[in-house]
Structures are given as structure tokens and as C-alpha cells.
């Protein structure tokens, strides 16, 4: 998986991975909001253990997203237009969702909260969507990162990545205490690390994912280890009261096994071949809508209530057995994914309509001029 002829060209296998990663993200939020995870000091049964297993294989999703971005952006040109579209997309959801909810009488926010109003109007600055904030920052820095990467030798890049990974993820992965500087991977600093890893893989490849079998083995092995460590720490905590914090660490984005698992899954999809046909056309239609699915279900007025809405229709998962839990999970994430995709499809058509009518404006010409500076 080194340099490729189709530089800057996205492929269907990675677009499918983007869709799967979003389903994984919804799964992570579903498990958290439905209390289907083992928690320190709390009783847990077979459903929670099943939830931990599911979480162990889905926790790589965010790192996978950044790997996909870094892999393609390192060979792509920076576009101011892309930044403006990203910001516009975030604002579309941050502002319109509360207006629609108030208009329909289902507003779930806290009326009169001034800071909440700021979260609607300034979603990036307030980390209304932490991922969006970190991702936009990463994209803004990408021209600098790419320029640095391409002037460094392979060895220099290895040293830089190694040092950053040690600081942001290596030490915290083995020391069972919480550091002041550790944000569990929910920040731009960690995204920078993952971006550099993706850039390295694009430029030089990496032997542990040099074959389909190795890549899948890395992903599955890391998932099983995460499950064993997290679940094992839970039972140690139950027996001794120790490791209450550390049982959460394997499920941090900057945990080393989480990164390695993400690299394994990303590498495995490099060998996936998708023939042209109906399935390929569905992927092409759905892939551009994945970010909108995130912005929809993680809006501050929706993130804590969407599982309640789903349970109003299909019943509470707490009353189900393990088999019922699995079915409940599948239905829930598909409902949210389909609803989010439908809404973002509307948003996409609105943006395209606006784009056609603004194409000849002075502002559009100015943006094209800025984009030309980065070619």
C-alpha cells in the first residue's frame, strides 16, 4: 500500500469503509446511551459483555476516518472552497436543527441558556461537535503538514511520528493514571498524529498491512486484545476496586491498540475490490452523506435523546436478551443512518443549488483565486 497511480482519486473500497465507519460511530453512541457497556462499580451482565465486544471492534472508527483523510489529502491540493463547505455544513445542522425542533414543538434543549445559543452559532469554537472542530483544524493545517512531510526523509518522518505517538498515546497506554494533557484522542493533536501515520502509509507503505491476511489479522487481533484488557480490568475492579480508570483506556482513540486496529482495518480495505453495478452506485450515493449523519445525530439537542425516540418505536433494549439486544442495535443504527442520510441528501441538494447560483459571483471568483494559490 505505497504510492499509487490514482493520486488524489478516491476509490469505492474506501468510500465503503467510510460508510462502515459511520455505522461504527453510531454504534459507539448507541452503546453508551443505552447503558450496554460494563462500567466500574456497576453490575454488568451478558448484554454488557456483548456490548463491550462490539465496542472493541467499533472503537477504531474515528481513527479510520482520519486515516482515510490523511491518505488522500497528502497527495491532494488544499482548497479554501472545501473549508467553506465544511463550515457551512456544520452551521446548517447546528442552527437549523433547534429552529426546526422549536417550530415542531419537540425542542429538547435548555431554553434561556446563553452558552447553548453560542454553541448553535459558533459550533466549531465551542466544540459543539468535537470531531468537526478537530477535523477542520486538521484540514487547515494540511498544506503545512503536507509540505513538511514531502521535504522530510523517510527516517525523519519515522522519528517524528514515533515521538508524537509516544507523547500522545504510547505512555498513557501503559500507565494506569490519567494525565492532565491526555484528552483521550478527542483533539487536534491526536488527529495530527493519525494524519501523519496515514501520510507515511501512502508514501512508503507498512509491512504489517502488506497483505490482506496481515491487515485483517491486525484489526481482529487488536479488537480481541482491547476486549480482553477492558473486560479483564472490569473484573479486577469488581474484585479489588483497582483499575477503575484504566478499564476505560483501551477505548480511548489514542490508545495504541485502537490506532493499530484502525490501521489494520484501513489496510484490509485496500485489498477490497468492488465491481461496478448497483452496490457500487449505492456506495457512491451514500458516501458523501456520512458526515451529515454524524452532524445530525450528534447535535447537542439530539445526541442524548435519539435512542429514547427509537425505543419509543421498537421497545427498550433493557428488557431484551442478548439476541434481542443485537437485533435492537441493528435496527437502531440503521434507522439513524437512513434518517441522517435522507436529511443530508436534502442539505446536499440545497448546497448544490446555491453553488450553481453563486458560481459567477465575485465572492466565488475570490475563492477560486485563493484555491489557485495552492495549486
Image (tube, rainbow, N blue to C red):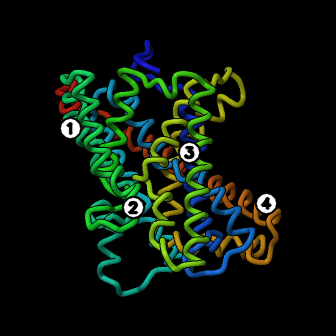
Whichever of callouts 2 and 3 sits on the residue coming sooner in the sequence is 2
Question: What is the number of the mark on residue 129?
Answer: 2
Mark 3 or 1: the one toward you: 3
Q: CA distance from mark 4 to mark 3?
A: 25 Å
The residue that mark 4 highlights is 327
| Of the pair 244 and 128, the residue shown nearer to us | 244
Q: Secondary structure at mark 1?
A: helix
Mark 1 or 2: the one toward you: 2
Residue 296 visible from this viewpoint = yes
| Of the pair 315 and 354, the residue shown nearer to us | 315
The residue that mark 1 highlights is 362
Residue 150 vertical placement versus 234 (above, below): above
Mark 3 closeness class: few <14, some 14–19, many ≥20 residues within 10 Å: many
Mark 4 or 3: the one toward you: 3
Q: Secondary structure at mark 4?
A: helix
Q: Secondary structure at mark 2?
A: loop
Mark 2 or 3: the one toward you: 3
Whichever of callouts 4 and 3 sits on the residue coming sooner in the sequence is 3
Residue at 34% from the left image edge and 38% from the top image edge? 195
Q: CA distance from mark 1 to mark 2?
A: 31 Å
Q: Tell me whether the residue at label 2 lies in contact with that at label 4, contact meaning CB atoms closer than 8 angstroms.
A: no
Residue at 32% from the left image edge and 28% from the top image edge? 74
Mark 2 closeness class: few <14, some 14–19, many ≥20 residues within 10 Å: many
Q: Secondary structure at mark 3?
A: helix
Mark 1 closeness class: few <14, some 14–19, many ≥20 residues within 10 Å: few
Q: CA distance from mark 2 to mark 4?
A: 29 Å
Question: What is the number of the mark on residue 222?
Answer: 3
Amino acid at each position: 500500500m505505497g504510492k499509487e497511480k490514482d493520486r488524489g482519486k478516491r476509490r469505492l473500497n474506501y468510500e465503503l469503509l467510510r460508510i462502515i465507519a459511520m455505522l461504527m460511530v453510531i454504534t459507539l453512541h448507541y452503546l453508551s446511551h443505552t447503558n450496554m457497556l460494563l462500567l466500574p462499580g456497576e453490575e454488568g451482565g451478558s448484554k454488557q459483555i456483548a456490548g463491550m465486544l462490539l465496542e472493541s471492534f467499533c472503537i477504531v472508527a474515528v481513527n479510520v476516518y482520519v486515516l482515510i483523510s490523511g491518505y488522500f489529502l497528502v497527495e491532494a491540493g488544499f482548497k479554501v472552497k472545501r473549508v467553506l463547505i465544511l463550515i457551512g455544513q456544520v452551521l446548517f445542522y447546528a442552527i437549523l436543527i433547534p429552529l426546526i425542533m422549536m417550530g415542531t414543538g419537540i425542542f429538547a434543549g435548555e431554553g434561556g441558556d446563553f452558552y447553548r445559543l453560542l454553541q448553535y452559532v459558533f459550533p466549531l469554537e465551542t466544540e459543539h461537535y468535537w470531531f468537526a472542530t478537530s477535523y477542520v483544524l486538521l484540514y487547515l493545517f494540511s498544506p503545512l503538514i503536507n509540505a513538511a512531510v514531502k521535504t522530510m526523509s523517510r527516517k525523519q518522518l519515522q522519528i517524528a511520528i514515533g515521538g508524537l505517538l509516544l507523547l500522545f498515546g504510547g505512555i498513557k497506554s501503559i500507565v494506569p493514571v490519567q494525565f492532565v494533557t491526555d484528552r483521550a484522542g478527542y483533539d487536534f493533536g491526536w488527529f495530527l498524529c493519525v494524519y501523519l501515520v496515514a501520510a507515511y502509509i501512502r508514501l512508503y507503505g507498512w509491512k504489517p498491512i502488506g497483505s490482506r491476511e496481515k491487515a485483517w489479522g491486525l484489526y481482529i487481533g487488536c479488537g480481541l486484545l482491547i476486549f480482553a484488557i477492558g473486560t479483564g480490568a472490569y473484573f479486577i475492579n469488581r474484585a479489588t476496586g483497582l483499575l477503575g480508570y484504566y478499564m476505560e483506556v483501551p477505548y480511548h482513540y489514542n490508545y495504541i491498540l485502537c490506532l493499530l486496529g484502525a490501521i489494520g482495518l484501513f489496510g484490509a480495505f485496500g485489498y477490497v475490490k468492488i465491481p461496478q453495478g448497483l452496490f457500487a452506485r449505492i456506495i457512491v450515493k451514500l458516501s458523501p452523506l456520512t458526515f451529515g449523519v454524524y452532524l445530525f445525530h450528534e447535535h447537542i439537542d439530539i445526541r442524548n435523546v435519539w435512542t429514547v425516540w427509537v425505543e419509543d418505536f421498537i421497545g427498550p433494549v433493557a428488557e431484551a436478551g442478548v439476541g434481542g439486544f443485537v437485533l435492537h442495535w441493528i435496527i437502531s443504527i440503521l434507522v439513524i443512518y437512513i434518517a441522517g442520510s435522507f436529511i443530508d441528501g436534502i442539505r446536499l441538494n440545497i448546497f448544490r443549488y446555491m453553488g450553481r447560483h453563486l458560481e459567477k459571483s465575485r465572492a466565488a471568483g475570490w475563492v477560486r483565486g485563493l484555491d489557485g494559490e495552492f495549486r
